[in-house]
Amino acid sequence: MKTMLEQIKGKLVVSCQALDNEPLHSPFIMSRMALAAQQGGAAGIRANSVADIEAISAQVDLPIIGIIKRDYADSEVFITATLREIDELMTVAPQMIALDATQRPRPADATLAGLVTQIRERYPRVQLMADIASVEEAAIAAELGFDCIGTTLYGYTAGSTGHKLAENDCAFLRAVLNAVSVPVIAEGNVDTPELAARCLQLGAHAVVVGGAITRPQQIAARFAAAIVQQGANRT
């Protein structure tokens, strides 16, 4: 049986997520979103929470990158931050789990290396994706034995605020590709089909697209802002 990395190589993964403050927050809605993504040609799904993954798995037969977003008072790390989230995710057995692999302080002063060791000992078959925000973090994650690296958090940490993957013809993606030998998945502000295709052309193993496909409030806001700007240009 092919691993998830083999199944998604050169293809699109759609992130189907809606937080509890968003209008589409619902396992049922996310499962239908995943079905629409599958019908549109997606080769995989990225999903948040046990409930959503369970509902999505009942609706589609695509491999899933599972995460749990949870806030901790003593850390900015919130994507699958501790072994607690790993244990919860493994009750629904996603083929891959993504976790924050930045060098920010982790909950309870834990270390990324220690967490990876615990996961490998307890769940040796699950593939691990490192969500990073810097080239240094990508290199560290590769040394720790992650199966793949995701550019997911570039632009979302203190050291990368304001940056986007598309800048300077995807300069950050190209730097990560040059720094590691493990597969690199392009994710984070991939907001057009052209950008997704360019990421693959540059050597990304796969591309994850989220808000540009599955968050209609963000899509509507982009249209509304463009129309407002056009009106301003006419005055």
Image (cartoon, rainbow, N blue to C red):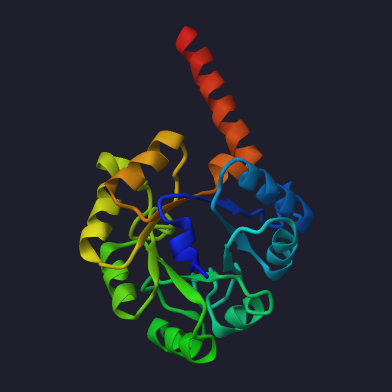
Q: Is residue 99 above or below residue 209?
A: below
Task: Pick out the residue farthest to the left.
Answer: 178
Q: Position of residue 7 (x, y in %)?
A: 49, 59
Q: Nearer the viewer, residue 105 or 23?
A: 23
Q: Is residue 149 above or below residue 208?
A: below
Q: Position of residue 98 (x, y in %)?
A: 50, 69
Q: Residue at x 48, y 90 (%)?
A: 118
Q: Is residue 157 above or below residue 74?
A: above
Instruction: Write down the quadrant of residue 53 in the picture.
Output: bottom right
> How many callouts does the rendering have?
0
Q: Position of residue 156 (x, y in %)?
A: 43, 56
- Left or right of 194? Residue 219 is right
Q: Nearer the viewer, residue 121 or 188?
A: 121
Q: Position of residue 142 (x, y in %)?
A: 31, 74
Instruction: Write down the quadrant of residue 138 in the picture.
Output: bottom left
Task: Pick out the residue farthest to the top.
Answer: 235
Q: Residue at x 38, y 53 (%)?
A: 161
Q: Nearer the viewer, residue 134 or 49?
A: 49
- Left or right of 169? Residue 184 is right
Residue 168 can be seen in this image: yes
Residue 110 can be seen in this image: no
Q: Residue at x 66, y 79 (%)?
A: 88
Q: Is residue 170 above or below residue 5?
A: above
Q: Residue at x 42, y 53 (%)?
A: 206
